[in-house]
Image (tube, rainbow, N blue to C red):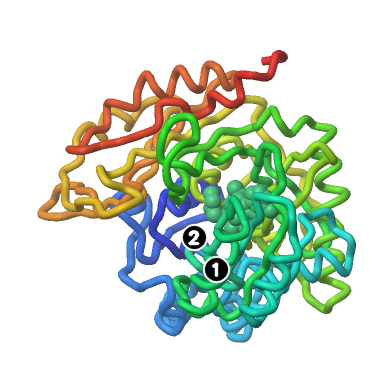
């Protein structure tokens, strides 16, 4: 069948790369894609939020399955619209996508169904939020804007003045736009984070190996937050026993809670988990594959990606046995100078051919485009170099051995991706 992948990041290149291995796939389209997806797929210049354009294209090309990368079209209801037209699509519908679209919706679901999370209050008036803060004595305190804020809507306040300032910024000054109509204020959870991405059809949950993102720009988790500077999997923090606990006490109760609310969640359920001294707690859900986690995790997937996506969309995941390589994987993001602040675009990228026939080392493009026949930078996060090896230590060695083969002026990457994993003695 012909498939359509929506998005243009490293995540979507990894999805295209993985889908291309499927025997069921004839042709892949990617909207809008990047210079990397153009090698395997045909890029079509339709934006991810142009749902009518995407629908028209899928209808005309008789697309057998659409895989949605980013959250924006999901939260806007692309799945409902495609399904109403009889088009198969992988991802949650609009009601289910509230899990990422509204923190208040998700936190209230956790409360109602007793799913372990940080204690919280939810406010639609800044005066009430300030009252709550004044009655609160323990710091830091976490202030979150309610809607989509491109991963930026979370402020960790060190004291009362900062917390009140955050509420005013979000609700009165609307620094995150419409996401500031409501805030969620919650207790700060201490611990290490992990990302659990799971296929689900609203009934069965099949978790991929746990991964860890590296959100800060500088080594040692310093500096401002980014979209993610690297990831590795499996994360030893999540032992097999813990993975089972997270599945049974967080993921399955979540899809079952949604079912009780009349919502069938299909697609990828991505739990941001904090491993606290009281056990795993869920910080947030995303309703899609993570970026850059996907670039590390999908290379470990042995099962046909298309089978998994189709089984999720058709509600028959219980018949699928998901197989994972007994190896480790790491991805390191190459970013433009200045990112996550202002950065330059249009720098020519050299050395990409070096990765063409390499075994277990891949380069997934993010912000790249083709200009006058040359591949140039077109975003903050530009490339992801991924290496797969027998264990995480060897994967780290491998990725850093090859990473400099790709080059552009001002290239920056973290040198310590995966280091967190090495503190575990059993490795
Ligand atoms: P969210 O968008 O809710 O995942 O928040 C983004 C990031 O903020 C998380 O990945 C955490 O690093 C941090 N964070 C969010 N909520 C909390 C919390 N309750 N305690 C500690 N850190 C948090
Ligand atoms: N890796 C963070 C995200 O995909 O939201």
Secondary structure category for the residue under label 1: loop
Q: Residue at 36% of width from left, 52% of height from top?
A: 37
Q: Residues within 10 Å of mark 1 (few under 14, many from 20)?
A: some
Residue 423's label in the rendered image is: none
The answer to whether 91 appears left or right of 69 in the picture is right
Mark closer to the chain start, 2 or 1: 1
Nearest the viewer among 8 and 117 is: 117
The answer to whether 376 appears left or right of 265 in the picture is left
Q: Does the image show residue 312? A: yes
Q: How many marks?
A: 2
Image coordinates of residue 266 in percent, x first then y, are 71, 65
Judging by the rendered image, the residue that carries numbered circle 1 is: 64
Estimate the spatial distance between the alpha carbons at disc 2 and disc 1, rounded to whole Å.
Answer: 35 Å
Q: Residue at 35% of width from left, 50% of height from top?
A: 340
Judging by the rendered image, the residue that carries numbered circle 2 is: 152
Image coordinates of residue 21 in percent, x first then y, are 51, 44
Image coordinates of residue 375 in percent, x first then y, are 20, 47
Q: Compared with residue 361, is residue 408 higher up or lower down, i.e. above or below?
A: below
Nearest the viewer among 412 and 5 is: 412
Q: Residues within 10 Å of mark 2 (few under 14, many from 20)?
A: few
Q: Does the image show residue 2? A: no
């Amino acid at each position: 069948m012909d498939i359509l992948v929506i998005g243009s990041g490293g995540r979507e290149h990894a999805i295209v790369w993985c889908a291309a291995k499927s025997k069921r796939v004839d042709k892949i389209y990617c909207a809008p894609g990047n210079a990397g997806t153009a090698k395997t797929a045909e890029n079509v210049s339709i934006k991810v939020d142009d749902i009518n354009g995407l629908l028209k294209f899928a209808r005309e090309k008789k697309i057998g399955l659409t895989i949605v990368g980013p959250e924006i079209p999901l939260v806007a209801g692309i799945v409902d619209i495609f399904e109403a037209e009889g088009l198969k699509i992988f991802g949650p519908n609009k009601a289910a996508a509230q899990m990422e679209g509204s923190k208040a919706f998700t936190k209230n679901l956790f409360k109602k169904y007793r799913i372990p999370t940080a204690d919280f209050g939810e406010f639609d008036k800044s005066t009430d939020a300030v009252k709550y803060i004044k009655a609160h004595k323990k710091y830091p305190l976490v202030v979150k804007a309610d809607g989509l804020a491109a991963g930026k809507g979370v402020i960790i306040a060190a004291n009362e003045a900062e917390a009140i300032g955050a509420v005013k910024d979000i609700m009165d000054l609307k620094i995150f736009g419409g996401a500031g109509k409501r805030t969620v204020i919650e207790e700060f959870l201490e611990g290490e984070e992990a990302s659990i991405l799971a296929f689900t059809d609203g009934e069965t949950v099949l978790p991929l190996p746990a991964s860890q993102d590296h959100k800060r720009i500088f080594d040692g988790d310093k500096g401002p937050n980014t979209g993610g500077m690297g990831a590795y999997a499996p994360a030893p923090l999540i032992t097999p026993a813990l993975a089972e606990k997270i599945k049974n006490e967080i993921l399955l109760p979540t899809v079952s809670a949604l079912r009780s609310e009349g919502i069938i969640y299909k697609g990828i359920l991505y739990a941001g988990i904090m491993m606290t001294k009281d056990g795993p707690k869920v910080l947030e859900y995303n309703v899609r594959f993570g970026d850059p986690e996907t670039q590390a995790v999908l290379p470990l997937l042995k099962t046909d990606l298309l089978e998994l996506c189709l089984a999720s969309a058709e509600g028959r995941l219980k018949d699928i046995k998901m197989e994972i390589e007994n190896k480790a994987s790491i991805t390191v993001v190459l970013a433009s100078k200045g990112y996550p602040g202002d950065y330059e675009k249009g720098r020519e990228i050299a050395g990409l051919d070096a990765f063409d026939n390499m075994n277990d080392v891949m380069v997934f493009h993010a912000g790249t485009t083709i200009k006058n026949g040359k591949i140039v930078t077109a975003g903050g996060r530009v490339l992801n170099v991924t290496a797969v090896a027998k264990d995480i230590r060897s994967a780290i060695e491998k990725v850093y051995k090859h990473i400099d083969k790709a080059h552009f002026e001002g290239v920056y990457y973290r040198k310590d991706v995966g280091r967190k994993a090495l503190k575990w003695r059993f490795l």
